[in-house]
Amino acid sequence: DSGVTQTPKHLITATGQRVTLRCSPRSGDLSVYWYQQSLDQGLQFLIQYYNGEERAKGNILERFSAQQFPDLHSELNLSSLELGDSALYFCASSIQGQNSPLHFGNGTRLTVT
Amino acid sequence: SQQGEEDPQALSIQEGENATMNCSYKTSINNLQWYRQNSGRGLVHLILIRSNEREKHSGRLRVTLDTSKKSSSLLITASRAADTASYFCATDAAGTGGFKTIFGAGTRLFVKA
């Protein structure tokens, strides 16, 4: 068990809808990362937060947004969903913002129909 | 992009044999990490090697780093069926949009019992 909790585990929704994915980092970790993994693909970096502040940004779509709250949990909001957004969304946390191992949750599997 | 690229894409070996996976990256790095992913699950951190290190061991794992060639290798000795998984390298370096941890596309390892 990595200590990182992601909810929900599965999400099925229709195109055009909006969903929120939630992540609770491992106790003591200040940094949260979000990744997208499409079927049989590598992980695409979306965004990273450190102690509530945005630290780094990847190729995150404008339809997607995220934030890290004072209690360090994070939410990833996906809006105007398209079929191509169907993927596994992983949250990871680390103690520092860089140069430290990432601890991954088990992901949220999003299916857009 | 600073994304690592693993080679080979897939590898099938017999139990007891050694498995070697390679990773190449494009720009200077602070460290390189290897992760393992069982199908549909979150990634698990295996080992982190810093840019000033050349080799690191952890149990049956041996990682080498050659910064002059911008490459790393992961060796799993005496493989077991339970080692069947995807293996990813990740590089941690500064770039446009901040400091990011970027993953390669992975090597799928299948160990036959």
Image: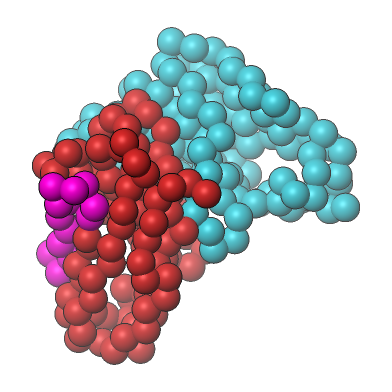
Chain colours: A red, B cyan
One can see residue B102 in this view: no
Residue at point 52%, 49% (across, down): A1
Q: Residue A29, image x and y in percent?
A: 31, 37
Q: Residue A88, image x and y in percent?
A: 41, 66
Identify whether B108 is placed above or below B88: below
Residue at point 60%, 24% (across, down): B63
In the image, taking residue A6 as reference, residue A42 lies left or right, namely right
Identify whether A100 is placed above or below A54: above
Residue at point 75%, 49% (across, down): B82
Residue at point 86%, 44% (across, down): B15
Q: Residue A112, image x and y in percent?
A: 34, 83
Name the image quarter holding residue A20: bottom left
In the image, taking residue B51 as reference, residue B110 lies left or right, namely right
Q: Which residues are magenta?
A: A60-74
User: Which is the main secondary structure of the residues drawn in magenta?
Assistant: loop
Camera-nearest residue between A81 and A11: A11
Q: Residue B93, image x and y in percent?
A: 30, 29
Magenta segment includes B65: no
In the image, taking residue A51 as reference, residue B111 lies left or right, namely right
Name the image quarter holding residue A110: bottom left
Name the image quarter holding residue B74: top right
One can see residue B50 in this view: yes
